Image: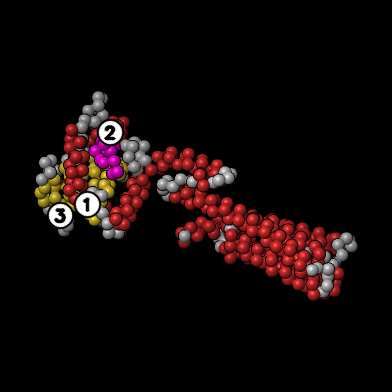
Amino acid sequence: MAADRPRTDAATADILLWQTGYRIVLVLLVGVAVVALRLAGMLPPPELVLETVGEDPADWLIVITTGVYALLIIGIRMYVRATRRAGESLSTLMVAADIALVFWLAFLLAEPPDYHRGLLVALFSLQLTHVYFGRAPALLMLVATAAGYLLLTDVAVRHRAGVEWTEALFTLALFGIGAWLVTRVQSHLHERLANLVAMFERAEEGDFSDSYDVAADHRPDAITAVGRAYNRMRGQLATIVLTDPLSGCFNRRGFEQQYRRELARAARAHTDIALLAIDLDHFKQVNDTHGHLVGDQVIAEAGELLRASARAHDVVARTGGEEFAILAPDTSLDGAQHLALRVVEAFRRRTFAEPQARVNITVSIGVVSDSVRDDGIAEALRARSDEALYAAKRSGRNRAVLWSQGLNALRLNQSGDSATVQ
């Protein structure tokens, strides 16, 4: 969650930037309109305001209130523009300022029986708050709205301004039901959208394991349509992002994803895992002698041969130009040896790029197998397989070499016998 915080703050900053612009314009228009109507005698102060505040102070309070609100919003806008970050505290502050402005203006401009109009405005604002800022600011706004309305009602009741608690509480109850429905619907929409966003973020990292659960949407809507679209493109994206187009094997990104996943699974089950580092011997000579088109064909056929030699649940990847890897889950030392020998023999018997070139090419393989206690073994396995691969190359290529403790390696000959390579 901590890694997602900067991204969330940046998204909130973008929302605040455009919303603060509208708020500044709106509050200035409201302030100018109210002052103009007051000067024209078309919007007299309510009797309760005249009794408790006075006419001239009420006019000044309107100007001060709108001015302070505008300055606060301008300050938030300048801060967000400078930092390009906005946490939940800033959005909460702006929501609190909205509620304070609405109910203070309601007190200064509306007759007490009309205070419920503040609830109506707050209901619209509540929905927008939930859409753009989430549940926490919306719930805070709901509580602040109820508190503001009860405060105004208490003032009106104390001054016998034509407001009864029974009617006010009934109005507040209706508002509460409406607000609950709004927050419930919006929360459900937010959860589903968050689901989709999480899937797209995992896809951005190359993880396409999750699909959108369309069946869970009992009342399909636009979000369901987006989920269906994601499911349709998920397989194609996985192929494009995780597969090497030339060899048909996993690319490095796809291999890393499968590698981490299998290591985590092996760590939970405390099972063995094997890693084979494979290099096509003297592949540069193929390109130099026959050209890159033939070289590409050899790579494509090598990938096909490796996939055919591996087991169904093994992970075959092209990790470099002529470098491949096979990850073999649930594979002991003996199983890794047999797999490596099978690959070596398959390349010895195969003629590539027929009929135009007829290339014979062999492989060198570094083999490691170990029991997985935790996924911290990832780099150690990789380093051991590379060391064994270099030993295979130094000892003549066209062979598989098994890494052993003490930085020695055991060379496997065609029959499966082993010898020590210093």
Q: Which residue is mark 1?
A: 369
Q: Position of residue 76 (x, y in %)?
A: 63, 63
- Residue found 11% across the figure and 51% down from its top: 420
Q: Which residue is mark 3?
A: 408
Of labels 1 and 3, earlier in sequence is: 1
Q: Are marks 1 and 2 in contact (CB under 8 Å)?
A: no
Q: In this view of the protein, which residue sits in the foreground, 323 or 113? A: 113
Q: Position of residue 300 (x, y in %)?
A: 30, 34
Of labels 3 and 2, earlier in sequence is: 2
- The amino acid pointed to by label 3 is Asn
- In the image, is 6 to the left or to the right of 390? right
Q: CA distance from mark 1 to mark 2?
A: 27 Å
Q: Position of residue 273 (x, y in %)?
A: 25, 51
User: Which mark, residue 301?
Assistant: 2
First to last magenta residue range: 302-314
Of labels 1 and 2, earlier in sequence is: 2
Q: In this view of the protein, which residue sits in the foreground, 183 or 338? A: 183
Q: In this view of the protein, which residue sits in the foreground, 202 or 247? A: 202
- The amino acid pointed to by label 2 is Glu
13 versus 301 height, above or below = below
Q: Position of residue 185 (x, y in %)?
A: 61, 53
Pointer 3 local density, CA inside 10 Å: few below 14, some 14–19, many at least 20: some
Q: SS for tag 3?
A: strand
Is 311 one of the magenta-colored residues? yes
Residue 388 appears in the picture as rendered: no
Q: CA distance from mark 1 to mark 3?
A: 14 Å
Image quarter of residue 24: bottom right
- Residue found 19% across the figure and 50% down from its top: 333
Q: SS for tag 1?
A: strand
- In the image, is 329 to the left or to the right of 88? left
- The amino acid pointed to by label 1 is Ser
The type of colouring in the image is: secondary structure
